[in-house]
């Protein structure tokens, strides 16, 4: 099978992070994954990605700014001709540290905040960082870089969409991403405390749409929690179709969570060229295209739009990565989704577990 | 009928009060013109576009002449406006004087006369005026012309402003303004007297005020379009322009998206230096492509599209 042209590279520089968000989508065993690529190795990956046709690189993690060699990494990405985007929590890099990154070719920044107010934001992050984040956001705008504010929405902050929009305006963000938590990694473990009820979600969506109509800036992007949908999301634009994820160890993946799928063989840029890892690793081809699909996906007229949904979700909820995404109303097995939805209509479960090094 | 007729003095006061608030002597573009703050490019854009308005005036007046209620006495007076505008022979009259003004501020006369480079928003505003007159009765049509009550004053302000701030515009270029200081008050006096005579009810008076308000809106939006055309687009600083060899096209890469440019988009974007006005850019494109009648308007559309897409921003 010939692999399609990738347009995006997600470079997970490290899984280390000073925050401990309970909805983290990093793997539960994140602490066992070492930072396997130095700046020079990343530079090679960036050049190979550019040759494959990649336009954008998102430097992410974990928290990419914990890397002491971040300036060198940005330099490598910019020299490869990629559009360099930093996805950060705004800590531990001090605002002054932005200058060297901008000098090295950084073009845009996505900053995460956990909530619209310090106490709630810090509580979710597991550390006092809200004010630091705001200072970082201002530093980004002072340097003329476009800012995207990203907020993972969940039951605890969904009611504060208006305040989040106001904060995004105050910080002069170009975009505000209201991304409902996707239930992978730590988020799946905490689902009972995070998944909103239908009414809570509808209220938040209505507020977000009202904000969008009131002003073109910031552009507001809304990612629905797919548990509350009747059709699966077009996960990553299709498995191995548009986006390359390289994890901190150098493993090349079709998405952030694919390493959680058992029995799939992915290759590493530590051993092979990126093009080979992208095109020929057995795991990359397992769910690429439509040949893997069963009914009802195989003959479904919507398969070109949703690409069969999320494989990691099928595995996490049904134990079978090739099953129809249980989000879909046409799926033969939807039990876990419907049960989670029903549970979300009750008051939230207590006992949020913050991300930590040991998942046991 | 129990409604009291609005006393003529009250209607006149209402019309004048409206003009004081809404006539385009308050428009930011005119204020800047009269302060001497316009660039040559802005003056050119204005003179060229406003000529389109001038060309619509005889049509509007012809439409008025044909209306129910325009009797011989009315026509005898009103037809003078068409003569004033078109002149007794070629090279005379208001249209010719405007061309002289346009030439004096630096426009290419044949381009102005050809009406090829008229801003879409200006065309829309002027056509809306002709359409208004076509679709409303004689009373409302005449009332809409009463912006002339304020035209004499604005012309005097303008002549002084040009002499002081734009001395490079030769004196013959100002003859249109001078002619209007004489003609506008005469025309306005006739129009006002006629309206006050023919608005017998409060309802009719309200329609007169509404018609004049609509006309003020049209003049205002015409200047809005001209003002906006003076913005100076440039590529947003964080954009990355690159040639995509795989697909053989130029891309503008932005955070989390990329915009593909076709050949004409690439040509226009290359000109956006933050110095040239949007109208100057569109003119350059229009002149380069004499065989494409829509090139100028397309360029304006494209600039607006690229601004909405976050590719271009305007220099402050």
Image (tube, rainbow, N blue to C red):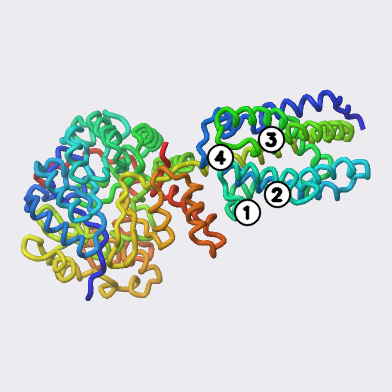
Where is residue A101 shown, x and y percent of the image? 18, 41
Q: Which of marks 3 and 2 is nearer the N terminus?
A: 2
Where is residue A172 shown, x and y percent of the image? 36, 35
- Residue B115 bears which disc, if any? 1
Q: Which of marks 1 and 3 is nearer the N terminus?
A: 1
The residue beneath circle 2 is: B55
Q: Which chain carries label 3?
A: B
Q: Mark 1 lies on which chain?
A: B
- How many angstroms separate mark 1 from mark 3 (CA)? 21 Å
- Residue B177 bears which disc, if any? 3
Label pair 4/1, CB-CB below 8 angstroms: no
Label pair 2/1, CB-CB below 8 angstroms: yes
- Residue A327 bears which disc, if any? none
**Between residues B297 and A22, which one lies in front from this camera angle?**
B297
The residue beneath circle 4 is: B43
Q: Do dots 4 and 1 share one subunit?
A: yes
Q: Earlier in the sequence, mark 4 or mark 2?
A: 4
Q: Which residue is drawn at 48% across and 53% down?
A: B284
- How many angstroms separate mark 3 from mark 2 (CA)? 16 Å
């Amino acid at each position: 099978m010939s692999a399609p042209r990738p347009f995006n590279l997600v470079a997970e520089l490290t899984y280390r992070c000073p925050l401990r968000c309970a909805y983290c989508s990093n793997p539960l065993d994140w602490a066992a994954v070492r930072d396997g690529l130095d700046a020079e190795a990343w530079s090679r990956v960036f050049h190979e990605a550019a040759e494959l046709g990649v336009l954008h690189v998102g430097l992410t993690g974990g928290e990419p700014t914990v890397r002491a060699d971040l300036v060198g990494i940005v330099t490598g990405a910019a020299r490869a001709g990629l559009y360099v985007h930093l996805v950060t929590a705004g800590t531990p890099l001090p605002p002054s540290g932005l200058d060297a990154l901008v000098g090295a070719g950084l073009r845009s920044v996505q900053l995460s905040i956990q909530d619209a107010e310090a106490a709630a934001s810090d509580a979710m992050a597991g550390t006092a960082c809200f004010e630091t984040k705001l200072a970082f956001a201002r530093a980004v705008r002072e340097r003329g870089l476009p800012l995207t504010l990203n907020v993972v929405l969940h039951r605890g902050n969904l009611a504060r969409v208006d305040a989040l929009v106001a904060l995004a305006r105050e910080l002069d963000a170009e975009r505000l991403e209201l991304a409902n938590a996707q239930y992978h990694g730590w988020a799946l473990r905490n689902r009972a405390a995070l998944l909103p009820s239908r009414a809570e979600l509808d209220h938040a969506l209505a507020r977000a749409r009202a904000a969008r109509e009131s002003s073109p800036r910031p552009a507001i992007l809304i990612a629905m929690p797919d548990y509350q949908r009747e059709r699966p999301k077009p996960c990553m634009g299709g498995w191995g179709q548009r986006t390359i994820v390289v994890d901190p160890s150098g493993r090349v993946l079709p998405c952030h969570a694919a390493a959680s799928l058992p029995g799939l063989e992915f290759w590493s840029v530590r051993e092979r060229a990126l093009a080979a890892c992208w095109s020929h690793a057995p795991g990359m081809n397992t769910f690429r295209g439509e040949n893997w699909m069963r009914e009802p996906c195989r003959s479904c007229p919507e398969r070109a739009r949703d690409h069969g949904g999320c494989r990691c979700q099928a595995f996490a909820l049904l134990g079978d990565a090739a099953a129809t995404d249980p989000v879909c109303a046409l799926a033969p097995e939807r039990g876990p989704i419907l049960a989670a939805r029903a549970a979300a209509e009750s008051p939230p479960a207590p006992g949020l577990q913050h991300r930590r090094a040991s998942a046991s | 009928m129990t409604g009291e007729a609005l006393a003529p003095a009250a209607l006149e006061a209402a019309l004048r009060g409206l003009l004081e608030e809404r006539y385009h002597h308050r428009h930011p573009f005119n204020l800047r013109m009269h302060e001497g703050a316009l660039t040559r490019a802005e003056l050119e854009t204005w003179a060229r576009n406003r000529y389109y308005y001038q060309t619509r005036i005889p049509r509007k007046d012809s439409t008025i002449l044909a209306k129910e209620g325009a009797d011989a006495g009315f026509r005898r007076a009103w037809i003078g406006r068409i003569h004033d505008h078109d002149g007794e022979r070629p090279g005379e009259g208001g249209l010719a004087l405007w061309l002289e003004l346009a030439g004096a501020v630096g426009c290419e006369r044949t381009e102005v006369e050809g009406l090829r480079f008229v801003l879409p928003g200006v065309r829309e505003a002027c056509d809306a005026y002709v359409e208004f007159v076509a679709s409303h009765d004689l009373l409302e049509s005449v009332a809409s012309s009463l912006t002339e009550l304020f035209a004499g004053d604005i012309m005097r302000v303008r002549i002084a402003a040009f002499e002081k701030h734009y001395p490079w515009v030769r004196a013959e270029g100002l003859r249109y303004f001078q002619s209007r200081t004489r003609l506008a008050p005469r025309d306005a006096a006739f129009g006002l007297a006629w309206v006050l005579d023919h608005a017998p009810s409060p309802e009719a008076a309200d329609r007169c005020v509404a018609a004049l308000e609509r006309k003020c809106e049209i003049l205002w939006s015409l200047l809005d379009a001209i003002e906006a055309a003076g913005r100076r687009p440039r590529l947003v600083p964080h954009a990355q322009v690159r040639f995509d060899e795989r697909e053989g096209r130029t891309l503008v890469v932005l955070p989390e998206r990329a915009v593909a440019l076709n050949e004409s988009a690439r040509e226009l974007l290359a000109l956006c230096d933050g110095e040239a006005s949007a109208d100057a850019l569109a003119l350059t494109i229009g002149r380069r492509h004499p065989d494409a009648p829509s090139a100028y308007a397309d360029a304006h559309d494209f600039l607006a599209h690229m601004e909405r897409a976050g590719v271009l921003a305007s220099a402050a």
